[in-house]
Image (tube, rainbow, N blue to C red):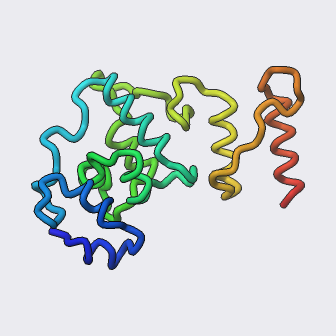
Amino acid sequence: QLTLEEVQAGYPEVTQEQFDQVDRNLDGVLSVADLPDSPIPPDDVARLELLRAIIRADLNHDGVLDFTEIAAAFPDAPAELLTRIDTDHNWLITRAEVRAALQQAYNGGLLVPLEDVNASGDIDAGDVQLVINHALKRYGQFVLADISGDNNVNATDVQQVINGVLQSK
C-alpha cells in the first residue's frame, strides 16, 4: 500500500487530485484493491486502441511514460497500467514494456509492425521522424513534414531534414 505522502516522496509533483483518481476505492491508499478486474482488453481491436492511446500519451515523445503522463491520459486507470505493464516496477512505462504487454495479437502475430513507431497503422514519415528525433535525443521536437513544398512527404524531405539536423549539431 502507498499513501499520498509515500508517492510524493518519489514524485513530489503528484497532487491530491491525481492520487484520488488512482485511488479507485477511495480508502486513502493505493493498493491491489484499486486495480480493475480486467486491465488489458481481451480482443485485438480494443488492445490496439489501448496500444495507440498509450503511445499518444507520451506527451514529450521521449519514448517513456511517467506517472504524470499516464494519469493525464488515463485518469481512471493509471495504477492498473503501471502494475500490469511496468514489468520492472519503476513507475515508468517504456516502449518495450508497452509492446511486450499489448503488441501481440491473439493469433500470435503483431498488432502493428515494429516499424510503425507511433502505431498509426501506416509506416510513414512520422515514424521516420520519431526515430531520427530519438536517435538525436531531440524528444518532443517535430519538424515540418513537407519540406520541399511539393505536397508529398518523401525521401527528399527526409533527406533534407536529416541534413538540417546534422548541420545544426
- Against 151, residue 17 (above or below) is below
- Against 114, residue 32 (above or below) is below
Q: Front-most of 76 and 129?
A: 76
On the image, the x and y values in percent for residue 50 come to 36, 35
- Please report the residue visible at 86 percent of the width from the left and 57 percent of the height from the top: 168
Residue extending furthest toward the front: 17
Q: Is residue 25 left or right of residue 128?
A: left
- Please report the residue visible at 40 percent of the width from the left and 27 percent of the height from the top: 111
Quadrant where the N terminus is found in the figure: bottom left
- Against 37, residue 32 (above or below) is below
On the image, the x and y values in percent for residue 87 come to 30, 55
- Please report the residue visible at 34 percent of the width from the left and 22 percent of the height from the top: 45
Q: Quadrant of residue 11?
A: bottom left
Q: Front-most of 132 and 31?
A: 31
Q: Front-most of 158 and 32?
A: 32
- Against 93, residue 16 (above or below) is below
- Please report the residue visible at 35 percent of the width from the left and 75 percent of the height from the top: 10
Q: Is residue 89 left or right of residue 131?
A: left
Q: Front-most of 93 and 105?
A: 93
Q: Quadrant of residue 91?
A: bottom left
Quadrant where the C terminus is found in the figure: bottom right
Q: How many marks?
A: 0
Q: Is residue 84 left or right of residue 31?
A: right
On the image, the x and y values in percent for residue 152 come to 80, 21
On the image, the x and y values in percent for residue 124 come to 65, 28
Q: Quadrant of residue 26?
A: bottom left
Q: Is residue 150 left or right of residue 41?
A: right
